[in-house]
Amino acid sequence: MRYLPLNEADRAQMLATIGAKSVDDLFVDVPASAHLTAPVDLPRYAGEMEVEAQIKAMAAKNLSPSRVPFFVGAGAYRHHVPSTVDHIIQRSEFLTSYTPYQPEIAQGTLQVLFEFQTQVARLTGMPVANASLYDGSTAAAEGVLMAQRITKRNKAVMSGGLHPHYTHTVETLAHAVGMETEALTPAVDAEAEVLKHIDKDTACVVVQTPNVFGTATDLTQIAEAAQAAGALLIVVVTEVMSLGLLKSPGEMGADIVAVEGQSIGVPLSFGGPYVGLFAAKEKYLRQMPGRLCGETVDADGERGFVLTLSTREQHIRRDKATSNICTNSGLCALAFSIHMSLLGQEGLKRVAKINYAKAHALKDQLASIAGVDVLTPRFFNEFTVKLPKVAAEVVEALAAKGILGGVPFTRLHNDAAFDNHLIIAVTETVSDTDMSAFVAALKEVL
Amino acid sequence: MSMNAVGRPTRPEDTAETSAEFKSLTGGKGLLQYERLIFEKKDYTRTGVDFADIDISPSDLGDLVRGDDLGLPGLTEPEAMRHYVRLSQKNHAIDLALYPLGSCTMKHNPRLNEKMARLEGIGDIHPLQPTSTVQGALELMDTLAHWLKTLTGMPAVALSPKAGAHGELCGLLSIKAAHEAKGQGHRRTVLVPSSAHGTNPATAAFVGYSVREIAQTSDGRVDLADLKSKITDDVAAIMLTNPNTCGLFERDIVDIAKLIHDAGAYFYCDGANFNAIVGRVRPGDLGVDAMHINLHKTFSTPHGGGGPGAGPVVLSEALAAYAPTPWVVNSGNGYVLEEFGEDASAANFGRMCAFHGQMGMYVRALTYMLSHGSDGLRQVAEDAVLNANYIKASLQDIMSVPFPDGPCMHEALFDDKWLEGTQVTTLDFAKAMIDEGFHPMTMYFPLVVHGAMLIEPTETESKAELDRFIDTLRALAASALATKNNTDDVARFKNAPHLAPTRRLDETKAARQPKLTYG
């Protein structure tokens, strides 16, 4: 077997050293009733060619976004990732290393994490950021729990613009720790609605911009009002590319920021693994979840980096930890950081503008179709339209024509009031031809 | 042989200066370059990605538009390659040498897995495409689920948890939901052995349970008498790692499961060490109700310097109805992705994350499973256990073993008793391994063993590499023991590592004066 270096001669020699007659002797502590005497009922060993053929057969049954006009977003986005990114993350030293517990032989990973934290802090406009969480949705949930620890209050108010999967993830975790949640009715442009729901028990308000319908909103007044009432503002961003063009959460007064970082460096991969970016005001540092990388010096006084403030963490504090997180999303954080370094602020601003321009061009074309209503008032690269037909059926009809035409809102939130709402994303990967094909096909199926 | 400018062979000059004292002018160490932070290059005008010129004014956004200076430097492609390749060379990696971190399972990561994860139709598909366009992806998830259920002998699996600790959370939330559904919401205590991973008590406390610790016997297993005395009406579950963190199989596990079930509680198994028994023992046959499986441990997905992982949770009949959304159903007429949990049962406890979990890890893990097959996976467990016992047998005459009776499973545990009277601690010994080219073992864990050194070689080490490792550790141990009688060997340990890219780092300073970003 190609991954198992021992042969029968090795095994016999090693058993002799151990003083065991057979490998069964090493499993002597297993209760006899639970001991399998033969392999379980699954296929046997297979070579690379056979395995590759089997996986490829499954891949071939999927409609690849690389082959068709593609407008699907709603929390995960198709962007161009420079070839360098995937090459570097497959270097053995990054791919096959562990969490940097021994900093003397993990300075590569640690310096990357320090740079990553700085990039995330600057991108979000916040003073501190951690070394990543699983994804944007779990980052949002961790943010809500952190707000409970800070304010000692027990209720989270979630805007109707928050991605429904995020709402559901936050509810699951918040209810598990005994918090109350108030999820407001989905609405295209109603961020300020959260203000009416803040009371003395409110730990935080969770607001997304651009929201799940694509609407971008200035949250400055919400931050002020929430903080005046003793609550924290958690800003969620699911399209990190938008921060190349839009005012940062920090500038708007956010206390905690939870971002899905997938758009920069990480492939769509059917929903994961992604990378959660998590940033906060400095005064909340010791309540943050997850790994933190910090600067220090070595025995010679040279600069080096280590994981730090681990007294917050499970392996030290056990049942008193700020979070149970151990593994995070290291390799995706590396991919994010490489792509971000390649873009730099100039590249990021430019690609963000291209996204904006293309999305607005498509919006103008769709607005001219009879019966199609553009609902989103201000947006970056994603907007929502109301169709004269059920959006899920339209999307299926478009798929049959080889076009992946957006996300019906009911895919995320099961409510017939939104049957005709379709969320459409346009990134730099969409060509003018793709847009024309989409418009023509949509006219045919409506 | 190297040549000088006139073509004559060169040789080292005699010199009194030792290389240990030599310092370069640049701060680098030959091929190990000193590498500045990208922020110290202070170049905010360059970019390594070319886009067409665009001259638009985002007029619809008004004053929502951000100012020009984001503080984010850019690197061209050659600069980026240099930066990251230089940094990479300061990391240890499995592809370089044995990486014996006990409990972490640093095994070889097959490259076919990486190739499959990047296929068109796998790596590039969107989680919210119409399900009619991703039938192959759902088939892949269903196939992975089938393998996991068959290997564990469990009837259900929740795929979406994103790491082991996330899986623990999923398992405990299923248990909590099941208790509440049965009117047993007053059960608020979780039993956890003193040797458990830190994530176990952290997860239990996280969901509002109080943690009651179970003592350990002198042979490294759960103390049944202590367990019996601590099972009260308010116990919701036990969280038990098996094989446990001492690298030992819990002999009484079937009895433990019965005690727990008789008391109306559930058995959560931390599956971090499933790699020791895969193909030889099915946790379902041991009475387990829920167990997470770290795909990045047992099923070889890369650790990536700290994730991403994946932690699917297999569930017993009793808990299956409480699994979180979403899940895949094979309807016989195609695969259905159930995202709202309204068809089969309304008992699901919620959602662990946006979308459907770590697809990129599912495909890697399934590729690994298909490669090994049922016979190969059984061999994986056998070789992992054989390798650990070989290390134990080869070192126990010079280093001390806290639980010497009987075989260990996939990891060999040593304590620091043998270092008594020397000038060397577990930490010193571990750091000295770095100078010899090996990553240290897990140290000071499990907490129940003094100065613990937990060595997990995994099945992907050859006998030759194991022998090299054993020879190195024996030589180091002899040197450590020599410090009882002389001081010549002390520096090898006290100031180690000497030959790493960085010397021993000041972690206290980092924590007292946290500096987490540049500038």
Image (cartoon, rainbow, N blue to C red):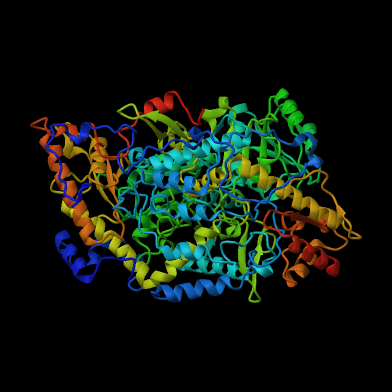
Residue A173 position within the rendered picture, expressed as x and y whole percent measured from the top left: 60, 43
B209 left or right of B15? right
Q: Which residue, as the protein is rendered here, is positioned at the far front?
A: B6
Q: Residue at x 78, y 46 (%)?
A: A186
- Residue nearest the viewer, comparing A112 with B297: A112
Residue B451 position within the rendered picture, expressed as x and y whole percent measured from the top left: 26, 37
Residue B270 position within the rendered picture, expressed as x and y whole percent measured from the top left: 43, 51
The tally of labels here is 0
A397 left or right of B494? right
**Residue B394, can we see it?**
yes
- Residue nearest the viewer, comparing A432 with A320: A432
- Residue nearest the viewer, comparing B119 with A166: B119
Q: Residue at x 19, y 47 (%)?
A: B473
**Residue A289, can we see it?**
no
B434 left or right of A268? left
B446 left or right of A343? left
Residue B161 position within the rendered picture, expressed as x and y whole percent measured from the top left: 54, 53
Q: Residue at x 51, y 66 (%)?
A: B144
Task: Give the vertical position of A65 relative to B210 (above or below).
Answer: below
Question: Residue A247 sits in which quadrant?
Answer: top right
Q: Which residue, as the protein is rendered here, is positioned at the far right?
A: A370
